Image (tube, rainbow, N blue to C red):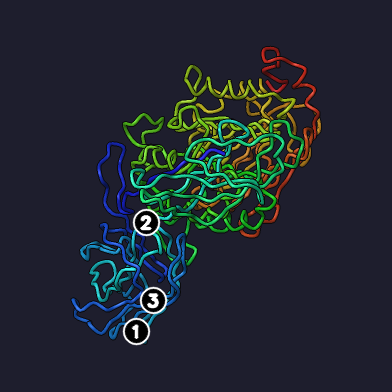
Amino acid sequence: MATGVLDRRAPTNTTLDCHGSSLPPIQYCSSSGRRCLVAASPGPHSTSWEFVSSGRHEEAAAAVGVGGRHMGENSEWVDVEFFHPNPSGDDWIGVFSPANFSTSLQTSKNDGYNKTGRGYLKLQLINQREDFSFALFSGGLSKPKLIAVSNKVAFANPKAPVYPRLAQGKSWNEMTVTWTSGYDITEAVPFVEWGEEGGRRLLAPAGTLTFDRNSMCDKYTYRLGHRLMNGTRIWSKSYSFKASPYPGQDSLQRVVIFGDMGKAEADGSNEFNDFQPGSLNTTYQIIRDLENIDMVVHIGDICYANGYLSQWDQFTAQIEPIASMVPYMIGSGNHERDWPGTGSFYGNRDSGGECGVPAQTVFYTPAENRAKFWYATDYGMFRFCIANTEEDWRPGTEQYRFIEQCLSSVDRQKQPWLIFLAHRVLGYSSCTYYESEGTFEEPMGREALQELWQKYKVDLAFYGHVHSYERTCPVYQSQCVVDGSDHYSAPFQATTHVGGGGAGASIFDSEFTTSKIQWSHFTDFDHGFVKLTALNHSSLLFEYKKSRDGNVYEHFTISRDHRDILACSIDNCPRTTLAS
């Protein structure tokens, strides 16, 4: 198991563009009558739970208060009560972290109480390494007026190690864990305590730990730690994970794949960049089925933070029940990388100035160059080749050479299931956006790569970016080599392409064409995700599940012995089929 630590002491209002300049503080504003969360300037910490009204404002009798137990370390639900003697429909509650905030910040309208002047909210707070305060406003968006302010409240240890994220290491027998902490590397030494469940525990500094084949069915427990300079040890709660299968291991292996999930507020309130309505449903369905899931692959558009660090906290807190137990592998999307003049393949502003830096720091990937964000990862009978569509992939480029090396180097006797993944649709999509481009793909996508998919007999290709679900027939050069089906048993003919970007982001920009597309076998205009199950070396189960209920709405199986693949060498596998 490899261990690492992420130092994120930057205040939650701070966000940097690619050249290091500070952007304005974030505003999380509700349109549903629940809350507005605004990150302001840093302030001192406090653990007090006594809330007071502000004497600095006209309505001195107004008050904001909270009930409940002392906050822990990761997240906590709090009960907030407030009163205003002159209520109106423009009144709203703001939650601020850090607690010291500027009353001159422009904020957005929140519907509120309007009869009794008394209100009640149940809100979820997450540890963002700073304290919190609550404020009552009137005046709505155009003329916000601060009415009452609570004192400051903080988590028991705002600097505590939280939100662990497991990931596959560079070798099959390495597991990495990255976490978030408020401790600077100069004030505390990060380490992990880990060991086989019920066995001896080991203390290891940030570095690399390995397990061997003999412990493949073993379960490991771990907890995160920091040793302060005075010798005190700060611990997280305990977590567990199962050892990854070795290449070729003949066991049940189950992988969930999706893109474009994002995050949302579990308490029903609104937040910054709030257009990922399906996010919580997808998260909850995966958590519900977690005992039957071995790994997750999130292919880009991770949390739509768009330059705000606090949104990465929101996302890592949301997926903690998943990422702390199974490897959570990610790919890069436009909302992680793209920014003008910084070398991204597309010159738009979709990353909000992040340029991929938070994504490659918050999550570990086994890439040779983590800034490039393309890599291979092996999991038992699977080989995953994860490309980065925000960097050039065309023939002659460094990434094209990586893609060919990843596809060509797999031992199909051990890993018969070869999967290609990328964020933008480099293969096929009948989304109206791509129809308007006149390509039904990302321009220059499959023209550059379809010969590689065909030559190396890629079973499945997955994409995000389009916020809905689509499966093609086995297709090559825009022709179905085999009709779409719920079962394939013949030798490999062509790659099946899957659009799986419907995990959370709004579907309303991802409608399908009304034209008849011969290679488009199944579409679903809804939120969902895919689950792959390698039953053995010759049988693969594919399931598409809706996020609303977790039920399977589309599936197929592949049964093949791969003799056609094993019989040919890299250079004499046919590049084309009769479809050409």
Q: Mark 3 highlights which residue?
A: 66
Determine whether 525 is above or below 427 in the image: below
Of the residues under marks 3 and 2, which one precedes in the sequence? 3
Q: Residue at x 45, y 74 (%)?
A: 69
Give the CA separation, mark 1 to mark 2: 33 Å
- Residue 231 left/right relative to 395: left
Determine whether 405 is above or below 202 in the image: above
The front one of 12 and 127 is 127
Give the CA separation, mark 3 to mark 1: 16 Å
Q: Amino acid at mark 3?
A: Val
The front one of 443 and 220 is 220
* Image quarter (top left, top right, bottom left or bottom right) of the C terminus: top right
Mark 3 or mark 2: which is in front?
Answer: 2
Of the residues under marks 3 and 1, which one precedes in the sequence? 3
Q: Position of residue 379 (x, y in %)?
A: 65, 35
Q: Residue at x 27, y 61 (%)?
A: 44
Q: Secondary structure at mark 2?
A: loop
Q: Position of residue 4 (x, y in %)?
A: 47, 41
Q: Amino acid at mark 2?
A: Arg
Q: Mark 2 highlights which residue?
A: 129
Determine whether 551 is above or below 253 in the image: below
- Seen as rendered, the residue at the extreme top is 571
The front one of 111 and 64 is 64
Whether residue 115 appears in this view of the structure is yes
- The quadrant in which residue 339 appears is top left
Q: Are marks 1 and 2 in contact (CB under 8 Å)?
A: no
Give the CA separation, mark 3 to mark 2: 20 Å
* Image quarter (top left, top right, bottom left or bottom right) of the N terminus: top right
Residue 117 is marked as: 1
The front one of 168 and 425 is 168
Mark 3 or mark 1: which is in front?
Answer: 3
- The quadrant in which residue 472 appears is top right
